[in-house]
Image: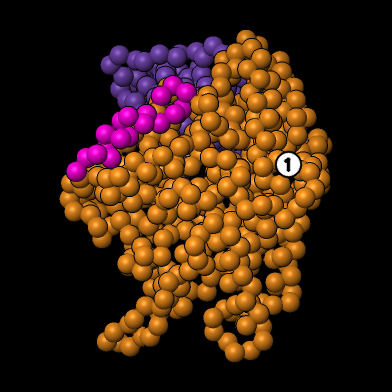
Amino acid sequence: MSAALHTPSRAAVPFDPAAVRAQCPILATTVHGKPLVYLDNAATAQKPLAVLDAERDYYTTANANVHRGVHFLSEEATRRYEAARGAVRRFVHAAGDDEIVFVRGTTEAVNLVAHSFVGPRLTPGDEIVITHLEHHSNIVPWQLLCERTGAVLRVAPIDDRGDVDAAVLERLLASPRARFLAMAHVSNALGTILPVAAFTALAHAHGIPVLVDGAQAAPHLPVDVQALGCDFYAFSGHKVFGPTGIGALYARREHLEAMIPWQGGGDMIASVTFEKTTWNRVPYKFEAGTPNIAGAIGLAAALDWLSAQDLAQVAAYEHDLLAYGTAALSAVPGLRLVGTAVAKASVLSFTLAGVHPHDVGTILDGEGIAIRTGHHCAQPVMDRFGIPATARASLALYNLRTDLDALVAGLARVRALFPA
Amino acid sequence: MSDLRDLYQELILDHGRQPRNFRAIEGASGDADGYNPLCGDKVHVYVKTDGEIVTDVSFTGDGCAISKASASLMTQAVKGRTTTETERLFASFHALVTGQGDSTEAAGGKLDVFAGVVEFPARVKCASLAWHTLRAALAGRGAAVTTE
């Protein structure tokens, strides 16, 4: 996959990470008296002023309910909400706005697809295929669905670097009972970039529809659902510099048309009588109740903010930053990187000999450095590597080499308290 | 933030590195699993009782320095006490790490090294996991204890 997949950037100015950083106010704050070093971007990304301003502007000049009133504010709120749908469509390169469903986040998107698309197609003994590196949110909805339908979960293994075993995946997809493939675009615990276009083609060769969990990919990789060929693509707003509580599901129009509703309520109906209710057209059929209007507008602001950068340069910069961090951490005595796939994005997951990740995290926090420690909602990945947890630094486009230098210095502090 | 040395006191680092009574007990009168789903820490606590007296207590498992040191110091503090005293000790320890008490005198004050935990709310569960698991082992509850 190449950054060239993105539509040409509107900005001709060279990418400047320091300038981007300056647009995120929280990154200039201090923690425990130390300048914040934010390396927990895979958990959630920080927000640029453009996002905060968009939400504030919405609430101060346009707040009303959408798709309802005839008054000025309702029309303005509806206009901005639907414009946000357009921004998402441009970001993922969908064919039409009606292929974008606003959801709370990736988790809800996966649950929606499990309930409304996959569930009705299953009979006992059918198989749902996932990979070993999935986040719990791309495991548990399928387990629940299996319980409900008698279907079976099949898991493609990963190797010691954190790459999915393509040969086994191909065998699983060749099973006559395989009905669906759900996989991450980028692993949150390991950073592995999956060859989703190739895997999608494999699945489609067997007539199997595909969902891609793009939560960790959207902030780092170009997303072109038409080039990937996937049937569904899900991502969360908050990981891509937008607000929490909003995300989007891309789904091919013919799938949305065929799917049963997700939740019942207002806005998702065309007409209601006690005898018979008919559904609204797509995508509204899947957006019951008053949506997160401000969140959608904030998300659109985030996507526009990101897309205003020269994304090819951003990709090159992040690649260089990850390589720099990989080299710097590899030089730390006793440090073992977990997840060493050739194609990686953002994530530096590691263990430090003799020190539990929780202790690493607490000591780094004392230095103002925010990382994630634990199982990263990917316990099967931890089990695969025989460890209970890792420490994880994860990068975004506003991180600098100095952040990684601070991390390495912080790890020296850890070692001072916990001598080898 | 208070100094990290308040949290990582020498005694804690020592017991975290070389936990005492870190073994299983053959023919234990009770045992239980403790699990902290937030961090994946697992502890298994074994107790041997003679009437009211806790004659032996031990643990196995993996966790951070705080959780291992807490389990280790707990086994030392509890061994030889009655189950009622153990319960009282748990109460004072719990009060200490949650900021509702300031001493664990009943244990000779040795557990007071955990007073620093109160400044690190995310770590309270690390310090208390072994204790919750011990209570389950004493109560003969087979089900696993979790911090959630």
Residue segment shown in magenta: A159-176
Is A404 included in the stretch rendered in magenta? no
Label 1: few (<14), some (14–19) or many (≥20) C-alpha neighbours in 10 Å: many
Q: Position of residue B104 (x, y in %)?
A: 60, 29
Residue A391 sits above or below residue B110 on the image = below
Give whichever of B17, A276 is nearer the camera: A276
Residue B26 lies left or right of residue B75; in this view the side is: left
Is A163 included in the stretch rendered in magenta? yes
Q: Position of residue A89 (x, y in %)?
A: 55, 61
In the rendered image of this protein, which colour is used for chain B? Answer: purple
Amino acid at circle 1: Tyr
Q: Which residue is mark 1?
A: A398
For residue A371, what is the image quadrant?
top right
Give whichever of B127, A131 is nearer the camera: A131
* Residue at 35% across, 19% down: B48
Give whichever of A342, A398 is nearer the camera: A342
Is residue A315 visible in the rendered image? The answer is: yes
For residue A76, what is the image quadrant?
bottom right
Number of marks drawn: 1
Residue B3 lies left or right of residue A223; in this view the side is: right
- The chain letter under disc 1 is A
In the rendered image of this protein, which colour is used for chain A? Answer: orange
Q: Position of residue B39 (x, y in %)?
A: 51, 33
Residue A91 lies left or right of residue A196; in this view the side is: right
Residue A31 sits above or below residue A166 on the image = below
* Residue at 30% across, 35% down: A170
For residue A38, what is the image quadrant?
top right
* Residue at 61% across, 63% down: A87
* Residue at 46% across, 36% down: A194
Is residue B70 visible in the rendered image? The answer is: no
